[in-house]
Image: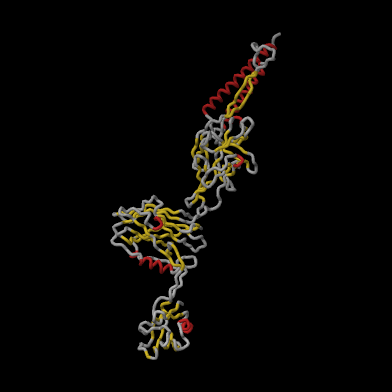
């Protein structure tokens, strides 16, 4: 009997040595949880026997218990190295299966498919989130792989610029906006079919007091330069006017239908030549004259005595001489006007006879110079006032649109949507920074703050993981996108988990079902990015246990040796 008792002791000591050796071997394994050998005595007695005189039958290994205490943190420079401080396990999934695996080892990397996984190709699971990073489900069945974006960040066109300014109030003199608006009108030129200005403008610095610029973006992420010009046009009422250009093209506050103007280069007014003669086609008044245009054939005209009894009858003849011309005699003078663009016309009026009497007129060539006719598509409006009170504070009530100046959306003409869309206007808000735009008696013009809501195309620059496990992709345009929130799981009895190697466990009946949740909520710990949880094995304690197990083994060996000596003594009795 003593041989079997001592043999059980040897086996127990050997198991203790094996458990301790395994702990020592994994002292450098990330996320490893040390184990301890637990033993129970063997005590054999019948149901009717007396235990007071029974002798034990040795020892047996009853359990190898895992110790889920917190390991120390080892900080690294890898964002995808993650450590849990507190309770919880990472939820992993074997690729191609629905089997869930749990681990504390947070050494992750990006695999060939752009998915976050560990070295065993087990995929890290996250809870799906909305655009604000709010988890939409915490069910383990609803977890998804953490996928790193393989596309560029989506650009966003600017719809609004928020600006906070300080204006000087000690300017030498107020300026009229007329000269600046004339420059803007000339560059706008009636606009094209989209309302875009025809040409750029570089305003004369003498026509405004100060200016500033900002970079804005179209829907394709292309940058554009917004320039704002400011004119103090009423020093009595402390009023400034704002004008804006985009890439040098004037931006109207609004655009209306175009108003055609006649071709004044082809306009002849006979007021001087025919003084005070009533041209009313009423008998017995008559008027006869010869007209020639640009050296062409002479046309003899007789009013109220020939075929031309009214202006409408005369129009086709004059139109034949000058393209698109019409006649107006209602003012008491002969007015010939054409709205067709063209060069100046040389008009010769001669042989004027009024009611049978010759009229003294200087015959010869009359050239009327001026601009060509225009037929603009749009008429722009430029007014944008910023009104200050006597204390230099912006007055919302009397400033244009309350200080939030609206401009017509700007078509960049590169295939992108108009800057300002989908809104009806492109806004420059001088109040959204707290209505602190001021006018100061001393100091120069300054921009206190400036922001805009657009951004360019961005490329992935990195991942950010906060202590609650929210993973965001960062892009070079300064934008971030929430990708998911790292899923954690805990168990009522983590020692009941079944260890499967690679510092991983699977759920068992003994462990209870996994309870899922977010880091930092309930009993779940926090997540530290750029760190790894080291093994929780205390090497010093394990070395002491190694010595203890060795002595236990030697002691049981000595017991066997002693039992053998006793047995030999009995055998040698004669």
Closer to the camera in the image, 273 or 514: 273
Q: Is residue 344 visible?
A: no
Q: Horizontal placement of 488 versus 49: left or right? A: left
- Asked where in the image residue 55 lies, by quadrant, the reply is top right
Q: Residue at x 60, y 24 (%)?
A: 38
Residue at image point 53% right, 53% down? 152
Q: Position of residue 448 (x, y in %)?
A: 37, 52
Q: Position of residue 282 (x, y in %)?
A: 42, 85
Looking at the figure, which quarter contains the N terminus?
A: top right
Give the quarter of the figure containing the C terminus: top right
Residue 498 drawn above or below residue 249? above
Q: Is residue 361 left or right of residue 569?
A: left
Q: Residue furthest top?
A: 574
> Is residue 37 shown above or below 340?
above
Q: 56 or 122, which lies in front?
A: 122
Question: What is the quadrant of residue 265 in the picture?
Answer: bottom left
Display colour scheme: secondary structure
Number of residue marks: 0
Horizontal side of 19 relative to 360 (left or right) equals: right
- Residue 284's place in the image compared with 204, above or below, is below
Identify the image quadrant of residue 15: top right
Q: Residue furthest front?
A: 283
Residue 446 in percent (x, y) is at 34, 55
Q: Is residue 167 above or below residue 180?
A: above
Residue 213 visible in the shown view: yes
Q: In this view of the protein, which residue sits in the foreground, 217 or 54?
A: 217
């Amino acid at each position: 009997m003593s041989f079997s008792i001592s043999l059980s002791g040897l086996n127990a000591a050997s198991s203790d040595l094996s458990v301790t050796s395994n702990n020592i071997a994994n002292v450098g394994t990330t996320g490893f949880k040390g184990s301890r050998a637990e033993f129970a005595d063997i005590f054999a007695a019948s149901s009717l026997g007396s235990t007071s005189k029974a002798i034990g039958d040795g020892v047996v290994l009853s359990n190898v218990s895992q110790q889920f205490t917190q390991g120390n943190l080892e900080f690294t420079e890898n964002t995808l190295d993650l450590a849990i401080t507190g309770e919880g396990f990472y939820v992993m999934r074997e690729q191609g299966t629905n089997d869930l695996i749990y681990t504390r080892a947070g050494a992750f990397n990006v695999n060939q498919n752009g998915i976050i996984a560990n070295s065993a190709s087990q995929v890290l699971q996250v809870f799906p989130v909305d655009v604000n990073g709010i988890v939409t489900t915490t069910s383990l069945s609803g977890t998804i792989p953490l996928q790193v974006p393989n596309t560029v960040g989506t650009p966003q066109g600017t719809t609004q610029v928020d600006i906070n300014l300080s204006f000087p109030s000690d300017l030498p003199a107020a300026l009229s906006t007329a000269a600046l608006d004339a420059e803007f009108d000339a560059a706008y030129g009636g606009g094209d079919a989209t309302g875009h200005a025809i040409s750029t403008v570089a305003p004369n610095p003498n026509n405004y007091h100060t200016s500033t610029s900002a970079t804005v973006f179209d829907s394709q992420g292309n940058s554009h330069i917004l320039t704002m010009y400011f004119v103090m046009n009423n020093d009595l009422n402390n009023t400034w006017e704002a004008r804006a250009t985009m890439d040098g093209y004037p931006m109207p506050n609004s655009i209306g239908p175009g108003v055609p103007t006649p071709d004044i280069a082809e306009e002849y007014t006979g007021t001087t030549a025919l003084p005070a003669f009533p041209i009313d086609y009423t008998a017995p008044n008559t008027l006869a004259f010869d007209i020639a245009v640009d050296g062409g054939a002479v046309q003899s005209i007789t009013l109220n005595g020939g075929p031309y009894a009214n202006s409408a009858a005369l129009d086709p003849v004059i139109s034949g001489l000058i393209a698109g011309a019409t006649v107006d005699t209602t003012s008491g003078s002969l007015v010939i006007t054409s709205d067709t663009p063209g060069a100046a016309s040389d008009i010769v009026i001669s042989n004027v006879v009024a009611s049978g009497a010759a009229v003294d007129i200087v015959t010869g060539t009359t050239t009327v110079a001026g601009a060509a006719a225009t037929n603009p598509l749009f008429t722009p409006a430029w007014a944008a006032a910023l009104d200050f009170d006597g204390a230099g504070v912006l007055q919302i009530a009397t400033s244009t649109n309350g200080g939030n100046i609206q401009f017509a959306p700007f078509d960049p003409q590169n295939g992108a949507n108009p800057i300002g869309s989908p809104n009806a206007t492109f806004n420059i808000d001088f109040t959204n920074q707290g209505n602190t735009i001021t006018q100061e008696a001393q100091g120069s013009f300054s921009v206190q703050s400036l922001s805009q809501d657009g951004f360019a195309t961005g490329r992935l620059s990195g991942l950010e993981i906060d202590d609650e496990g929210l993973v965001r992709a960062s892009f070079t345009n300064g934008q971030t996108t929430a990708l998911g929130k790292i899923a954690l799981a805990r168990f009522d009895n983590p020692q009941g988990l079944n260890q499967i190697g690679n510092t991983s466990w699977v759920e068992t009946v003994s462990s209870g079902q996994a309870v899922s949740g977010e880091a930092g909520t309930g009993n779940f710990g926090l997540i530290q990015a750029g760190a790894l949880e080291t093994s929780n094995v205390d090497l010093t304690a394990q070395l002491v246990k190694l010595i203890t197990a060795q002595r236990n083994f030697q002691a049981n060996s000595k017991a066997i040796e002693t039992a053998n000596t006793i047995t030999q003594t009995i055998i040698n009795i004669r």
